[in-house]
Amino acid sequence: MSGDHHNTDDTGPAARVKALEAILTEKGLIDPAAIDAIVDIYETRVGPRNGARVVAKAWTDPEYRKRLLANAKSAAAELGIAGPEGGHLVAVENTDRVHNLVVCTLCSCYPWPVLGLPPVWYKSFAYRSRAVSDPRGVLKDFGLELEREVEIRVWDSSAEMRYLVIPERPKGTEGMSEDELAAIVTRDSMVGVAKIAPPASPRRNAPRVRG
Amino acid sequence: MSTANDALNKLIEEARLDPGHVFSAPWEARAFAIALKLSESGYFSWDEFRERLIAEVGASDRIRARDGTSDRGEYYEHFLRALERILDEKGIAR
């Protein structure tokens, strides 16, 4: 028997969700407008830009960095960043000797307020099953080859603990403002599967987020 | 047969092409929002929901480990089954 199911017929997930929403609405348990609002928040408003602001501030303000490492939840709240699945947030910092990598081996635990919802690969069996046993191999898949001397610390997320990686600030960014820095911080770098490349031209080439 | 390695490379490539990608179909977004809303309204706690989600994901993982098959990003199918289960167990949608 195959565990694979196809989703295009009437018994597929789309039809099941539609039926579920109809019955829950009819019973008055949910309001479709409230569901629309939640979808909008997680599709467009909560995302890694929040985490990027936290990282950029940690890069430019040593006191903030200390507060972030001591209590990441309250440090994020200082920037107005809070929400579900944001409790027990822990910030871990990359250095030239230590590289941190975040996974949730059991399901999909992820710090929503700072990173939004996780990408598809984060939830995949391929990533979850190998991040702990073969972190170097996984990083190689992401195009990141670390020196052998660099220690890799793998953090397995849970209901109790969520992790935000503070990536290393790239060289050539000394003159950049906090906002400019935030624009070069990527989601992947805050999960630990990438480093941040130095900008080609320090002041002007910061990539912008679409739209 | 594709390996776990190939599967991850494919998902990484897809994420590169569409970095903001969170849901692969509208039903995934609705299922997520319905679960979050019911939890926020106190019909169940998110931890209770997560227990079911971990069970669904774990069952799929065991099949993949046994058969050596890779996933295609069907996380929200597990998510939906976990939601259906908790609604059923708590008699919420009856």
Image (spheres, grey):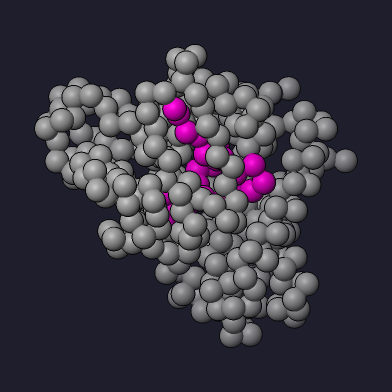
Q: Please tell me which residue is depicted at 73% across the width and 22% down the height of the picture.
A: B1
Residue A206 highlighted magenta (yes or no)? no
Q: Position of residue A32 (x, y in %)?
A: 50, 75
Res. B38 image quadrant? bottom right
On the question of residue A46 being in view, the answer is: no
In the depicted structure, whether residue A74 falls above or below residue B60: below
- Whole-percent x and y of residue A42? 43, 58
Q: Is residue A103 magenta?
A: yes
Residue positioned 55% across, 21% down in the render:
A136
Total marks shown come to: 0
Residue A143: percent from left, percent from top: 46, 21
Residue A160 in view (yes/no): yes
The picture places residue A153, in percent across and down from the top left corner, at: 52, 32
Q: Residue furthest right?
A: A1
Q: Nearer the viewer, residue A148 or B25?
A: A148
Q: Is residue B93 above or below residue A201?
A: below
Q: Residue at x 33, y 56 (%)?
A: A75
Where the C terminus of chain B falls, by quadrant? Answer: bottom right
Relative to A201, B10 lies left or right: right
* Left or right: A122, with A180 as reference point: right
Tell which of A2 and A109 is nearer to you: A109
Residue drawn at x 50%, y 43% as measured from the top left: A119
The magenta span reads A98-123
Q: Nearer the viewer, residue A10 or A112?
A: A112
From what the image shows, is residue B94 above or below residue A46?
Answer: below
